[in-house]
Amino acid sequence: MSNPKTEKSVRVSPSDRRKSSVPRPLATLALTDHDVYLFREGTHFRLYEKLGAHIAEANGLTGVRFAVWAPNAYRVFVSGTFNGFSPSSHPMSPVRDSGFWEVFVPGVEEGAAYKYRIVAQDRRSKVDKSDPFGFRHEEPPRSASFVHSLDYKWRDTRWMTARAKKQSTDQPISIYEVHLGSWLRDPDDPKRFLNYLEIAEKLALHVTETGFTHVELMPIMEHPYYGSWGYQVTGFFAPSSRFGTAQDFMGFVDHLHQRGIGVILDWVPSHFPADGHGLAYFDGTHLYEYGDPKRGYHQDWKSYIFDYGRPEVRSFLCSSAAFWLDRYHLDGIRVDAVASMLYLDYSRKEGQWIPNKDGGRENFEAIDFLKTLNTGLYGSFPDITTTAEESTAWPLVSRPTYDGGLGFGMKWDMGRMNDTLEYMKIDPFFRSSNHHKLTFRMIYAWSENYVLPLSHDEVVHGKGSLINKMPGNRWQRFANLRTLYSYMWTQPGKKLLFMGGEIAQEREWSHERGLDWHLLRADDHAAIKKLVSDLNKLYRKRPSLHRFDTDPRGFEWIDADDATRSVLTYLRKGEATDLPLVVALNLTPVPRHDYHVAVPIPGSWKEIFNSDAAIYGGSDTLNRGSLKTTKVEHHRFPQALSLTLPPLGAIILSPVRPRRPRAEKKRNKAASPGPKKGKK
């Protein structure tokens, strides 16, 4: 069983990563009337093709064409290494009345650092800004942008042509959430971040071993404060330079794709930081943010809120999302903090917010933006997925806009996560009175296309690790964790587990250090990794566990009411040709012998998974061999199985397909027509 910390670092060969940069004709970078129209309409999804710094050619001269939006500026200049960062050597010209400024500077080459000098209308206020459309920035705390092309030779055609099928709601989607800066550090220098390419091979190997289908990265867009985990973004079009270049990150995505692993990016359109080089007060006015702090300032996060009512800001955000899907081949985005966008009174007391035009608390402008975003992204990239982190009961989040929804593909089930973790923390002696915390979810389970998360938010800020939330002695804590995972993987919905959960990380997560990979030397931690791997394999192999993840046909209670013994039994079902599976959970440390479970099919059944198996660190209380049904009316079905339910354990049962007699197989084979002879 491999340990990523001890595996030799493998760097993806840079020789194949990049083609030489080819200058674009300057005319192709011109901002057309159509660009301006879409921009002002709030529906431009490709601004990155025209704004920012692009290597260009004009009249036989090669240089860089710079373009920026600063409609309220008095003057705009570009300064950089090519002019000694002179604040006034290269003035930019306004593009008609569009609010754009541009200039072509011959002789500037790739790698040049630059900033925009913005002179406000009062002519006294002057500030140096990073490029909002910069493709690469200096590593913080420095803040200049770099001229940087996005040329790259992709080798993931096989993945890209097949991903529409892999990301359908009837397919197994199991997501491994990762914070790149703390998944793994350099073993020889724990303070050094690994490069995107250094981490790619190790991460791909680990994800393949544990059976996840996708990796979800916490935000890797450029952010000045590392401790924000990437959620305070200043560079909405650039991967963080802490981990390498744009091409390095492309190589990271490319490598995972070649290993059959999808890549989802956490994307943050809900707010941005107040750092002076960023978007805040960009041209001397509240350009990107709402002007009134009751709408434009997050008190909790000390950051600014995008002005979703300004079409140009919507175009900026739509272009950012499309950029990562287009230029980086990402397979989806997870939109952070959607609830904070939807509600004007989010985390505000009375008198601290401004009602909408109807006197309500809904942010109509943000709602319109989210609908536009999802419609545009799915229109351009129909095989991707967008997921909302939305923590309230807002209706139809993952329903099409033409049905009145917000248009997301999926939504995190935050309620289920909170209820389940609250239940699992309880001493088993008191669980019977909290049985509803596990059963309530099925009342609303089909209202959205749900992802079932156990995310980073649950293992930080004093909440402790997952294993340390579990009650009891060490054996019981590990047994509880195994049952928690078994319950999650057999419930309808796609799966998400934050890094470290698969090895039963004991310390609370910290962004300042790598995971405790040495734990895998202990049998009980290695056994948790084995359990997660086997659950993922079973989830992918058995259609009844994934085909109807978002359809009520995929689930049926057998007995949801055995609160006295803290036992749950239910069916997972697929198409008529898919074998149904019976799941039984025993949430107490007391084994249940001769426990009768009704089943839909008479005959032989077998246990195909038991979280209490010795290979997972359990007591090995198994149901061995072939299990025969007996005729008895029990919970709607005319037959039942007599089972042993392991302590703090989960089991999965499958009917045994009757084997055809060998003589019948021979007759069928003899009767089948062979290939015809003759010309091809």
Image: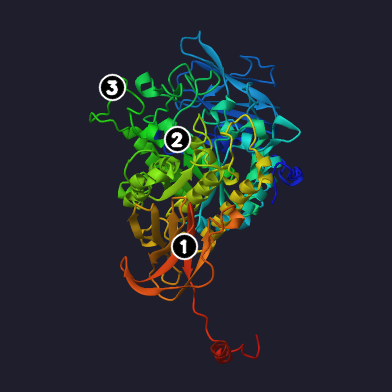
Say whether residue 270 is visible: yes
The crowd level at tag 3 (other Cα within 10 Å; few <14, some 14-19, many 20+) is few
The label nearer to you, 3 versus 1, is 1
Tell me whether circle 3 and circle 1 mark residues in contact (CB < 8 Å): no
The answer to which image quadrant residue 179 occupies is top right
Say whether residue 46 is visible: no
The mark nearer the N terminus, 2 or 3, is 2
Provide residue 574's location: percent of width, then percent of height: 43, 65
Q: How far separated are the C-alphas under marks 2 and 3? A: 32 Å
Provide residue 342's location: percent of width, then percent of height: 35, 34
What kind of residue is marked 1?
A: Thr
Q: Which mark is residue 315?
A: 2
Q: How far separated are the C-alphas under marks 3 and 1? A: 56 Å
Provide residue 509's location: percent of width, then percent of height: 57, 34
Residue tagged 1: 644
The mark nearer the N terminus, 2 or 1, is 2
The mark nearer the N terminus, 3 or 1, is 3
Residue tagged 3: 350
Most foreground residue, 226 or 642: 642
What kind of residue is marked 3?
A: Glu
Q: Please determine whether, in this image, residue 64 is positioned above or below residue 640.
A: above
Q: How far separated are the C-alphas under marks 2 and 1? A: 59 Å
The crowd level at tag 2 (other Cα within 10 Å; few <14, some 14-19, many 20+) is many
What kind of residue is marked 2?
A: Ser
Residue at horizontal 50%, vertical 54%?
Answer: 167
